[in-house]
Image (cartoon, rainbow, N blue to C red):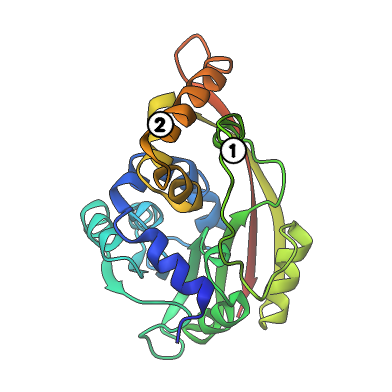
Amino acid sequence: MAGEFDAHERRMWTGAAEAYEGSFAALCGATAEALLDAAGVGAGTRVLDVGTGPGTVAAAALSRGAEVVAVDAEPGMLALAAANAPGAEVRHAVLPELPFSDGSFDAVVANFVVNHVEDPWAVLSELRRVIRPGGRLAVTIWHGTGNEAMSLFNLALDEAGVERPEYPTPPLNFARTAEGLRGLLEQAGWAEVVSSELAWTHRADPEVWWSGPAGGVANIGLVVTGQPPKTFARIKSAYDRLVAERVAEDGLVDLPALALLASGRC
């Protein structure tokens, strides 16, 4: 049975698939190739893409000639994944349980998924169950610091005088550092664990970037869309002013991003 954090995640993502695909998905998709490299995904690899979202990683794996199964808990994401990765087998699944027998896959990948589950240890243990002996896992999460991608929204909320509600936090927490993520995988039984940082600059149209919270995506979206119209307008006005200070000559805004990538062997 889902706990408070998992139940919140299910509510948070319900109906947000298209808004996510049109806003934050490009940022999250930037790690797809590094993730697949770390998992050793290539031609003929049978790979499970957990928390596939709109199917970005699944499509990238298909382009390598892999045999892809993609799962997600949100029906709207599954519809997008089926359209964006038409060669993949797309199925509904809610972590930490997967509808597959032991040793079903050569590799498992999870792009920004472990940070969205109540019990990451249980999820990583379940992923180890469905992979064959010697198979590889690769996961990404956001680093605990160094990300400016969401800072514009938080600054806009501050300027508009909006207080943040207290959303549930996972009871099993860990340091959002390379060392913390490596330790989590090792505790879940993964061997030969390697963990590192991935840094890049995401470039986005300011209105496209705003469409994420305006469309109710993630906790920031719940805060923004939960405001009365006048407050929503104040947040947008503050965002417009803040982003205008950062826009480049081509009209795009540079958003430094920092993620963690870890891989291990079963």
Q: Amino acid at mark 2?
A: Lys
Q: Is residue 17 visible?
A: yes
Q: Is residue 186 left or right of residue 32?
A: right
Pointer 2 residue: 230
Q: Is residue 81 above or below residue 202?
A: below
Q: Residue furthest bottom?
A: 102
Q: Amino acid at mark 1?
A: Asn
Q: Residue furthest right?
A: 179
| Image location (x, y in percent) of residue 3 | 51, 80
In this orientation, which residue lies closer to the viewer: 132 or 79? 79
Res. 195 image quadrant:
bottom right
Q: Residue furthest top?
A: 249
- Residue drawn at 44 percent across, 25 percent down: 206
Pointers 2 and 1 in contact (CB under 8 A)? Answer: no
Res. 19 image quadrant:
top left
Quadrant housing the N terminus: bottom left
Pointer 1 residue: 154
